[in-house]
Image: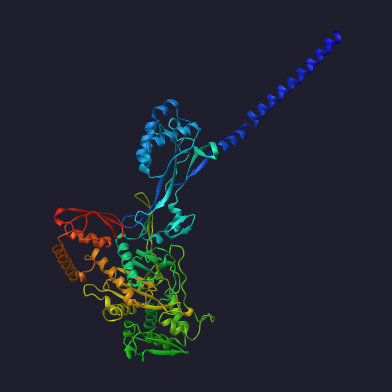
Amino acid sequence: MAVTKQNILNRFYMVSGMMLVFVFAIVFKLTQIQWLEGTKYREEAFENTIKQFDIPANRGNVYTADGSLLATSVPKYDIRMDVVTVPNKIFNRDVSKLALAMSDMFGKPRQYYVDYFKNARHQNNKYLFIARDLSYSEYEQIKQFPILKLGAYKGGLIVNQRTVRGHPLGKIAVRTIGYDDDHGTAGLEGSFSNYLIGKQGTHLKQKIAKGQWKPLNDENQIDPEDGLDVITTLDLNIQDIAHHALLEQLELFEAEHGSVVVMEVKTGQVKAISNLARTSKGTYFEKRNYAVYESHEPGSTFKLMGMLVALEDKVIDTSTIIDTEKGVISFYGEKIRDSHKGGYGKISASRVFELSSNVGMAKIVNENYKNNPQKFVDRLEAMNVGKKVGLPIKGEGAPKIPNPKNTKEWNGLSLPWMAWGYGVKLTPVQTLTFYNAVANDGKMVKPQFVKEIRKQDKVIQEFESKVIIDKICSQTTINKLKVLMENVVKRGTASNIYTPYFAMAGKTGTCQTDYWKGGETEYVSSFVGYFPADNPKYSCIVVIHKPNKKLGYYGADVAAPAFKKIAQKIYTDTPIRNELKVFANADEILEKQLTNSSKKVAANYESIPNVKKMTGMDAIALLENLGLDVTFEGSGRVAFQSIKPGESLKKYKSIYLKLL
C-alpha cells in the first residue's frame, strides 16, 4: 500500500515537473515574443495590416506670360463608405435621408439607394462604392450628406484623392506644353518637370476585406508640397491669332499639316507656337510639335543665308548684274528652273532675291565659291546655320548642311543646290532664329519659351534672354538684307500681302518634298519675316506642308497670307505708338478705318447676327460694335450664342458666347 502511494506521488511529481517546465517554456516564449522579438512581430503585423502610401503632390501650374492658365493639376475624388462602422441608431435613423441626398445628386430613385446601403450593411461591406471622379465642389457637397458628414469613424466616410492634368484653355499649344506621365516626357512639362513635380506626402491606410485599403485617419503623416509654377513666354492673344491664321490657311488649301511661330525680336521670347495636322475627317488638331522637331528642306527661305554670305564676303553687291538667262540652267545634267517661264534675263542681285530666282541664286553662289566651297560652308557654320539652337524642349530636329570635308555627302551639285534651299535641312524654329537675328541687327538670340519660375506670387528663378552670337555679320550687310526683304513684300514674290498701312519684310519659300521617292510631286510652302519692317518688334514663320496643288502651293499664296493676318491683328490689337514715331500716320489711318468700320457694322445690322463658327476675336469685336455687352467662355470658334440670329437688337443689351 505504501509502495503504491509512493508510486502515485512519484508520478504526480513527474507530471507536475513536466507541467512546470511546460509553463516555464510558455512564459519564456511569451517573454521572448513580447520583449526580445516583440518589435519584429509588431512591425510585421503593422506592415500586413497598416501600410504607408505616398500622396502625389499637385504639379505646379503652367501659365502664359499674361497670366492665363495653360495646364494645372485638377483634384479628383473617389468616395467609398464603411457601412459597418456606422452605429445602428445613426444608420437606421438617417439612411433614408442619405438615400434622398444621393438621389438628388446622382438621379437614381431614393429607394434604390436605401436598398443599396441596407444590403451592403447586411453583407458587412467595409468599402462600399459611392462615387468616382468628383470635382472639389462635388466632394465638398457629398461630405455634408447625412451620416457621411460624421466623418471616417462614425459616418464611415472613405475619401481617395488623386490628381489629373487639365488644360483649361483646351488644345492651345498643347504639344508645346507637353506632358510628363506614363506616356513619357515631352514639351515644357517634361523639360521643367523638376520644378513642377513638387514633393509627395505620406498617408497611413489600413487593410480591410478583399485586399482593399482604406485611410486610417483624416490626417496625413506628411502633407504633400505643391510644385512650382512655370510662367511661359506665350501671349494668349497672339497665340489665338496665330492659331486661327494657320488653321484658316490649312483648311483653305486642304494641307496635310503646318506650323507657325511668333517670336519677340529683341528677347527671343516665343509669343505663339501652333502645330496642326489634318485628320481623316478633314479637321485639324495638335498632333506633333512640327516647329521644333521637323527638319525639312526650306527651299527659297534659305536664299537669305546665301545672299548674306555673298554680300559679307563682297563677292557681289546688291547692284551686281546676274544673267538668269531663260530661267533654266544645268549642272551635271540636272536642271534648275525659275518659276517664271522664260526667266528674268539680266537683273540685279537684289531683284534675284526679290523675285526668288533659283537660277540667279545658284549662279551667285556657285560662280563665287565653286573653287572654295569650304569657305561658303564655314561662313554658314560661323553664323550657327546647321547647328541646333539648344531649345529647352526635348526633340529639337537635327539640321543638315552638306560639308565638302565629308566626301560621302558632297558632290558637284551640293553647292548650287544649297543656294536655293535644297540638300539642306532646318526646322522652322532654326530658320526663324536666323531671320530674327537679321531683324535684330545681327544679334542672334536663343528662342525662349519660359520666362520665370514662381511659387505663388514669389519669383523663384527668372530666365534672361541668351545670346548665341553677338553679331552674325556687318551692319552694312544687315541693312542691305533688310531692304531686300522689305522689297520682297513691296514688289517681289510676296507683293500680294503688301499693305500701305504698315511695313512687313520677309521671304517666300516653295520647296518640293519627297521628290527623291518618285511619285506625285508635293510641296512645302513657307514665309518667314518680321514686322514692322522699320523697327522690328516680332518675327514670324509660317510653314504649310502638302497643300492641295489644285488650290495652290506657292509660299506667296499659301503661307504669306497667314503671316499677313498675324501681323495685321497683332499690330491692331497691340499697337506700339509709344515706340514708333514713324507709325503715327498709319495709326491715325487705322483708327479711322476701325471707327468707320464700327459705324458701318452698326448701321448694317438691325438684328442679332449669326456668329457661329466665327473666331472668338472676330465675333466679340462684331457684337461689341453693335453695342452688346459680350461675355464668353472657352477659346477658339463660336459654338453657341445665347441669342438666336435674327432677334431684334433693340431687345437685348448682352449676349453670351461659348467658344470651342
Residue 23 appears in which quarter of the rendering?
top right
454 vs 45, nearest the viewer:
45
Residue 251 appears in which quarter of the rendering?
bottom left
Percent across and percent down for residue 275 are 38, 65
Q: Is residue 402 left or right of residue 23?
A: left
Residue at image point 27% right, 79% down = 495
Q: Quadrant of the N terminus?
A: top right
Percent across and percent down for residue 538 are 31, 68
> Is residue 474 something one can see in this rendering?
no
Q: Is residue 254 left or right of residue 370?
A: left
Q: Is residue 268 above or below residue 416?
A: above
Percent across and percent down for residue 290 are 42, 67
Q: Is residue 596 above or below residue 184?
A: below
Q: What colour scheme governs how the chains and residues are painted in the rendered image of this protein?
A: rainbow
Percent across and percent down for residue 272 are 34, 64
> Is residue 310 something one can see in this rendering?
yes
Q: Is residue 588 above or below residue 145?
A: below
518 vs 453, nearest the viewer:
518
Q: Is residue 636 above or below residue 332?
A: above
Q: Count up the numbered dots.
A: 0
559 vs 273, nearest the viewer:
559
- Residue at the top extreme, as displayed: 1
Q: Quadrant of the C terminus?
A: bottom left
